Image (cartoon, coloured by chain):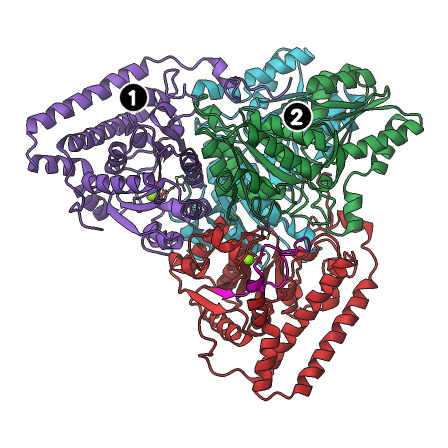
Chain colours: A green, B cyan, C purple, D red
Amino acid sequence: MAQLTYRAAVARAIAQEMRRDDSVVFLGEDVAAAGGVFKATPGLLDEFGAERVRDTPISEQAILGAAMGAAMTGLRPIAEIMFADFFAVAWDIVVNEIAKSRYMTNGQVSFPLVIRSGNGGGLRFGAQHSQSVENWAMAVPGLKVIAPSNPRDVIGLLAAAVRDPDPVLFFEHKALYAAKGEVPDGEIVDELGTARVLRRGRDCTIAALGAMVPRALAAAGQLSSQGIEATVVDVRSLVPLDTATILETVAATGRLFTVEENPRLCGWGAELASIVSEECFHDLDGPIVRITTPHVPLPAADVLEDIALPSVARVVESVRTAVG
Amino acid sequence: MAQLTYRAAVARAIAQEMRRDDSVVFLGEDVAAAGGVFKATPGLLDEFGAERVRDTPISEQAILGAAMGAAMTGLRPIAEIMFADFFAVAWDIVVNEIAKSRYMTNGQVSFPLVIRSGNGGGLRFGAQHSQSVENWAMAVPGLKVIAPSNPRDVIGLLAAAVRDPDPVLFFEHKALYAAKGEVPDGEIVDELGTARVLRRGRDCTIAALGAMVPRALAAAGQLSSQGIEATVVDVRSLVPLDTATILETVAATGRLFTVEENPRLCGWGAELASIVSEECFHDLDGPIVRITTPHVPLPAADVLEDIALPSVARVVESVRTAVG
Amino acid sequence: MTSTVPDLPDIASETRMELYRLQLEMRHFEKRAYDLFMQSLVKGTSHLSLGQEAIAAAFGVAMMPGDWTFATYRGHAHTLARGVPMTAVLAELMGRANGLMGGKGGSMHLTSVEHGVMGSYAIIGAHLTIANGAAWSAQYRRSGQVAVCFFGDGTTNIGAFHEAVNFAAVWKLPVVFVCENNLYMEYTPIAAVTAVDRPAADRAAAYGLEPVVVDGNDADVMYQTAVRAVERARSGAGPSLIEALTYRHGGHSRADPGKYRPAEEIAAWLERDPVPLYRSRLLSLGVPRAELERLEQAVAEAVDLATEEAKAGPPPAPELLMSDVWADGGSSWRN
Amino acid sequence: MTSTVPDLPDIASETRMELYRLQLEMRHFEKRAYDLFMQSLVKGTSHLSLGQEAIAAAFGVAMMPGDWTFATYRGHAHTLARGVPMTAVLAELMGRANGLMGGKGGSMHLTSVEHGVMGSYAIIGAHLTIANGAAWSAQYRRSGQVAVCFFGDGTTNIGAFHEAVNFAAVWKLPVVFVCENNLYMEYTPIAAVTAVDRPAADRAAAYGLEPVVVDGNDADVMYQTAVRAVERARSGAGPSLIEALTYRHGGHSRADPGKYRPAEEIAAWLERDPVPLYRSRLLSLGVPRAELERLEQAVAEAVDLATEEAKAGPPPAPELLMSDVWADGGSSWRN
Ligand SMILES: Cc1ncc(C[n+]2csc(CCOP(=O)(O)OP(=O)(O)O)c2C)c(N)n1
Ligand SMILES: Cc1ncc(C[n+]2csc(CCOP(=O)(O)OP(=O)(O)O)c2C)c(N)n1
Ligand SMILES: [Mg+2]
Ligand SMILES: [Mg+2]
């Protein structure tokens, strides 16, 4: 057991998988010699060499196309898209090619690849470097979508993603890179498609993702001291979605709150709300409440960004108003 | 009053606006000399000349970038993205630049531009030429999103989009291009952000978009003969969303069904369901049911595509099971 | 256009016969596809290679088993070139269960991994980057495989083209980029939208590559060009970018009668139709007319047979709709 | 590197003084931005032009009112070059209400339409296509305006670069593309990821353009190059693609100490620091040292004053969060 940062967990996960399997290769901008602009991948070039850990030009389409072509011909590439906002410059490769090609070919080709990316806001980077775009990916059939909230999950879920035979978009949260957590020694492999119940409470379920998980937990702590007991679910995996765990908790509490960093419309919270309102309708004791960033681009100034993203106070307030 | 096809309505709308305003220009691949691959824009080059109606290289980023730059410096461009699936190759320009730049600049720049595109399936074009991607756009703050279901709305809403000071993504449905409808003579200008109630019935609300609107109407007809009276709403405008009209009908009927062509997860149906389940919770008599294409890429074969997209029969069946 | 005099050792006569056979097969196949379209048996859209057969045929012969083809929506010929059975391709066009992909992909996405056909891609540009990935895999595994990627003149103006060719050059990947310059994107002449005369060759230097312009309607020239480029890739010398000049006889796709093209232009290119041109070449090289006629007859019959077999296929089973999104064979996105 | 001997009529002495003044302002400003960063008064990130000032200054002087600048995240200098007040820029970096965009954009998105600064763009490549649009608008309206678009060496490898330059050439747009080749993308040497030596100039021919490589650290050379390109655009002769060789003195962004660069390389380029270089030039041309010192003093004081004014700004009002998504000033997506 050791204290590890979220960013160090990334490098450890990649190293764990590269040691195990020669077909795992890693490419991206500034990831090799420089160890990544978020310093999440130092040491990999030294350990695995320039054939397996490769710096690329600023050519996101070429990066993801290379990952795709390599995956369909026997490798298991991990590609980095530096900031998740940059998925937009290579979205075609992701949604039209990687996501659809197994289906279109009637299963002739496999895409065991991972695209990891720095997602989310809170660092005052402004509208083009702060987006949470996991919902873009969730809306497209053929992509698995993962977003870990802590160092241990980074390792376990990234390892599982690398071993998965399907394409996985792995959303690391930029604001969590410096966060520390306890991580067991030795190999860690988790399971995609599993949510984690972090806390049980009878009054409501709060489902959160990525950097919103610590906020949801903090909110649950405060609510508890005000007499409201919340179940907190770390969704972790948007596709596959662990509906069983989530529906079970909602059936028990009768209330659902989602805490989403993505802008309001058509996020995973909406999907969850729709599933629950269709399938748990009679278990619900009150409206489902989505706590989201408003439907605006993100501002750069700290004071504005802080009121944009769901805060602990906003979660507490929303739950108390609805449940209290 | 004349019978007009949906495709002819496109050309009429553009001509109407170009006659009125010299700053309206039009660009895209094969749109000028050839009149568009869907034959939706013939005659415009002849009438307005090669300075205003321009063929471009296969360079979607350059097309949309040009539209953006022109819009911020005094023109009102209409750009065509031939198939909506191709938005993916220029998604950065749409979501990171066009959608955010007014906000980031604190309102210094305006983007009075329209991007029109052939959206949707049913023509056996396979997974890369059949997608309904209006939900991709809806998920991004800063874009207005329109999808007309008939020739009259094509004219009225496209004219309104051209006159609107904000960027509008205008999703024409490929399977409707040949559809005919009555269209009044003279100038037609409609209003963005308005849904249309096409039929009133006490038992449920069916909300549909684009090519699903005629199907929803046909289903309502069949349901009526089985004693179930449905209100049918043509959503028309996803952003701005006419929640007032929709919520009003759901309050009256107590049941909501959405009929979506996009794949299941995180579509506009999920957004609507979430809004209704949050804001109309106590008006609801039963679960909200989303009728969607399953969360798979679209197959090419006719028999498969036909069972993929929501059909009249599926709508009838879903409503009857839930309400009947 | 470079000379049609081959500057490599002469081509073996069996190789020439195979080049002719493939061109014939493509020619008959594409005409049949067109007819079936007219009978509404092929749905959706389809993009024929009529007039461009020499290019795909040449690479089909020059490539080795294990090499990879990356094609476009205009990919029937390139698929057949690798030995994929006509029945499966026709059936795919017709959306039948016996189609190459069970009807799920359609005309624009022909794929047969077994034959090294790693897909046909319908969104301009993407597959150049994907071909790089396969080439990277070959390079990393030292497998000696080569990826060949076909695309059109219009494709040279999209961003992915630029990213892919630079990337391939920097990584010295074993990939061959083949631009079939048929003078038009869909309906727009390439010259109207391109800053240089030779959309591929005039860009080669931007990636440190040699400009290569060849007569795409001469199967011998194409074959020798293909051999050289494939060999270069296999030897580790890196990518090539080839511009093959050619012409499509019909419109861009089913929907297009191709009326935007001057009659003289069409006439001039029909004069240079690769199939009769190659037939004359073979005759002049002494191949007996009867041998050619036997081959022509055999190919025509094979296409007829394939048509009947394809037509006999049932529609795909409804279960296919929900299959093979994931490697487990299913499509479930939830538990 | 081309000769530093100007081949245009000599530069007027007031012009030279303005070139110097702008470079000084940029130099002092960027150093101050760095200090404020270190004091955590500038949040987020920022990318400085220290060492690259001659390029932005030259265009600032060569451009006319009404011309448009399109800059990158490394855009402080290019913004100041058009006369945007330092206070507003510094305040924007600090996220204050008196910032150029009220704090909503931040360091990477500086925009001042009033000064022709049509935005700073933080995702590589996009703004080349957007600059085309402005140029198209000028061409269509026959306004005589010119768009100038700045970007780095690394940007030449992304798809949008290729699409934009081809598009501009085909449409003969009044746009000037200025590649500031500072030898690195973020931390990776450009040579490691680019198939040609000159990432912009060696690609010019791919768009039918002349290769132009200039000493980006010599403000006179840059100025004359800028005048020529801007004039060419204004006259209707179409776009230019300029590669200006330069070097950034610091790391890529705040987070980067720039350790990946060889000490000798840094030393050699510090020898060629454009600001002292230009000072020597002015002295050798007979400008009195006292005049330069007065100017230097004035600029230093102006930066101090701007810093104080910027710091005095309040934080943005919370209402700004929900404003100006739409032209009506609001952000409502529903009725
Ligand atoms: C990104 C993208 N834009 C537009 C299209 C529509 N489209 C299909 S084929 C084609 C023309 C391609 O021209 P070229 O590369 O010359 O190939 P050819 O069809 O002539 O073989 C276009 C524009 C597309 N499929 N993808
Ligand atoms: C599409 C995209 N990919 C990656 C980045 C991250 N990034 C920001 S600046 C930069 C380097 C750009 O290099 P260059 O064009 O040489 O400009 P310079 O920073 O040297 O001025 C990179 C890779 C980005 N902003 N956008
Ligand atoms: Mg072509
Ligand atoms: Mg650089």
Answer with the quarter of the image where residue A284 lies.
top right
**Per the image, is D252 magenta?**
yes
Q: Relative to residue D167, is residue A271 drawn left or right?
A: right
Residues flagged by tags 1 and 2 on a common chain: no
Answer with the quarter of the image where residue A18 lies.
top right
Along the line of sight, the residue nearer the viewer: B18 or A6: A6
Q: Secondary structure at mark 2?
A: loop
Q: Position of residue C203 (x, y in %)?
A: 37, 53
Q: Which residues are magenta?
A: D243-266
Residue under the image location 93 percent in, 29 percent down: A225
Label 1 to label 2: alpha-carbon separation: 47 Å
Judged from the image, the quadrant occupied by ligand 4 is bottom right
Q: Which mark is residue C85?
A: 1
Which amino acid lies under the numbered mark 1 shown in the image of this protein?
Answer: Pro
Q: Which mark is residue A188?
A: 2
Of the residues tagged 1 and 2, which is closer to the observer?
Answer: 2
**Where is the C terminus of chain D found, in terms of image quarters?**
top right
Q: Position of residue C268 (x, y in %)?
A: 19, 46
Q: Give the main secondary structure of the magenta stretch.
A: loop
**Do we see residue B70 in this rendering?**
no
User: Exactly how many numbered labels are in the figure?
Assistant: 2
Q: Which mark is residue A148?
A: none
Residue B195 drawn above or below residue D79 = above
**Where is the N terminus of chain D found, in terms of image quarters?**
bottom left
Along the line of sight, the residue nearer the viewer: D292 or D75: D292
Residue under the image location 44 percent in, 71 percent down: D2
Q: Position of residue A24 (x, y in %)?
A: 52, 32
Residue C271 drawn above or below residue C312 = below
> Are the residues tagged 1 and 2 within 8 Å (C-beta)?
no
Chain containing mark 1: C
Which amino acid lies under the numbered mark 2 shown in the image of this protein?
Answer: Ile
